[in-house]
Amino acid sequence: PLDRRRPNARPSLAARPRAPMRSAIVVGGGISGAAISRFLAEGGMRVTLLEKSQQLCSGATWHAAGLVTRFGGSPKLKKLHVKAVDMMSDLHDRFGVDMHISGSVRIVEKGDSARLAEARQHVAMAALYDSPGFETRLVGAEEIKAMHPLINTSNVDCGVWTPGDGDVDPTRLTNCVASLAKAAGAEFRLRTGVTGVERLQGGRFAVATDQGERLEADVLVNCAGLWTRELAAMLGLQVPAVVIEHQYVISEALGAIEARQREGKPRLPVLRDLAGSSYIRQERAGLLIGPYEEDCRVTAWGDAPPPYWTMDLFPDALERIEDNLMHAIELVPALGDVGFASVVNGPTIWAPDGLARCGRTDIANYYDLNTQTYGIAQSLPLAELLAGIILHGEEPWAMPDVCPLRFGPGPAPWATPGFVTDRVRETYAHNNKVSFPYENRPGGRARLPGTGLTEALREEGAVLALGGGVESPLCFPPEGHP
């Protein structure tokens, strides 16, 4: 049936006849690949997962900090994160995936009126989109101190308390989900890299492996993580994403935490040190500090990491995050009394807007579930979302924020490597900054091809907004208006 509300409307996806999708090849053995394999296998598909390494979680999953949260900067992300924590909590209750629920506090410092306004907005949004039993609320400095006795509240105004937050062991979670996928019939092939992909007549795919095999399936899912661009290039597609370095440090044991553990006291809540742009969570008897540095490093890898890369890390570069760490020490002075037990500087892949790619692509039956900036926190519900598209032809809920086609088909010519790199650097650095409605940030726009009209509008005082690779006038503010 046609949608009579729109002239010349096409039949809805649900109404179009679909050939049954009986088999799928999933490339990538991280949390994304394990999760989509589980949902597709439980939906009745014959699933084969290919992982180039000798074990699951290679690439980026294994070194993830494992934070999970019910917080979200937008209603859709909020609902996604709530669903993720509920799904992981269920797995932990049933199988034990080393999940720690401690809650989290987003710190608002004194005198920061913009941050306080943002905090109030987040609390109001949470009331609409979270479960009644998990009340997000503003808490004062005294209550924060009671929750986290190690914190210095001398410059703390208040915080946003999000119950139900915490962290999970990425490897245990992935292996648990993989076991469920295998129990539903999925086959996992380790030490099996993909060397080529061919689109066959009729829309099926033939995948060549480094084991000399040629595997065929109705559906191909790109969960290749750091190797996302390489797999897409085998089909003639370019993915607007780059691999960057993300560091975190783990402190030596803190006496105060060891004492809490002996006394059987609860785990410390996660601190979101927004002014210092880092997260601080308990790791055994120490603290893990993960900064978002102002000038992140983008690798020069091109489409893929070096051939030897599996569970490798970059050299430590603490000088780049020194300011973040110093602010963390000001917030938690006990950190200044111990050293760092370990430093992790690992690769992660980012899209220009910092959001995942999940859904349909330019090629029918070839799907993306990759470029997950917050892979541990989002993979389970995103895999369920994609499984709905593959098995039933439409999303079980609307999530346009993660559509792989949001940067245009192919991608669009304006999403050049230079644009993507500039935009990722800006998005990464902005991670803990205050966001305002209708923000119009400049990252990457100098890379766009200019036009005479654009320059003329700018000379006339127009404030230009970027949309779909085109700068268009947002408004013409009065003279003297900021």
Image (spheres, grey):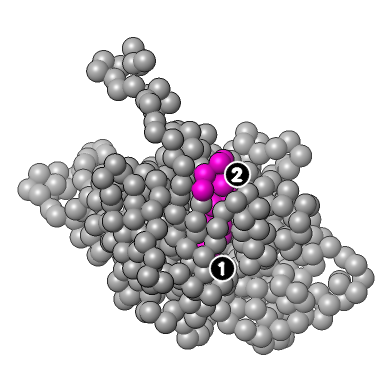
Residue 45 in the magenta stretch? The answer is yes
- Residue 437, quarter of picture: top left
Image: magenta residue range = 29-46
Q: Which mark is residue 56?
A: 1
Q: What residue sits 24% from the left and 57% below the top? A: 236
Inspect the magenta stretch and tell me whether residue 136 lies in it: no
Secondary structure of residue under mark 1: loop
* Point 77% across, 52% down: residue: 94
Amino acid carrying label 1: it is Leu
Tell whether 107 sits left or right of 112. Answer: right
Which residue is at the front of the view, 299 or 322? 299
> Which label is found at residue 42?
2
**Residue 175 or residue 267, whichever sits in front:** 175
Badge 2 local density, few (<14 within 10 Å), some, or many (20+)? some
Asked if residue 331 is positioned above or below residue 409 in the image, the reply reads below
User: In the shown orientation, is residue 459 left or right of residue 178?
Assistant: left
Q: Look at 62% across and 61% down and name the residue there.
A: 174
Please tell me which residue lies in front, 420 or 138.
420
Quadrant containing the N terminus in the rendered view: top left
For the stretch drawn in magenta, what is the main secondary structure? helix
- Picture coordinates of residue 25 (x, y %)? 44, 54
Count neighbours of disc 1 (C-alpha within 10 A) and say few if under 14, some if 14 to 19, many if 20 or more: many
Q: Position of residue 119 (x, y in %)?
A: 60, 48
Circles 1 and 2: CB distance less than 8 Å?
Answer: no
Which picture quadrant has residue 2? top left
> Quick one: label 1 or label 2, which is nearer the N terminus?
2
Asked if residue 119 shows in the view, the reply is: no
Q: What is the x, y in percent for residue 322?
A: 52, 80
Q: Is residue 90 among the parts visible in the rendering?
A: yes
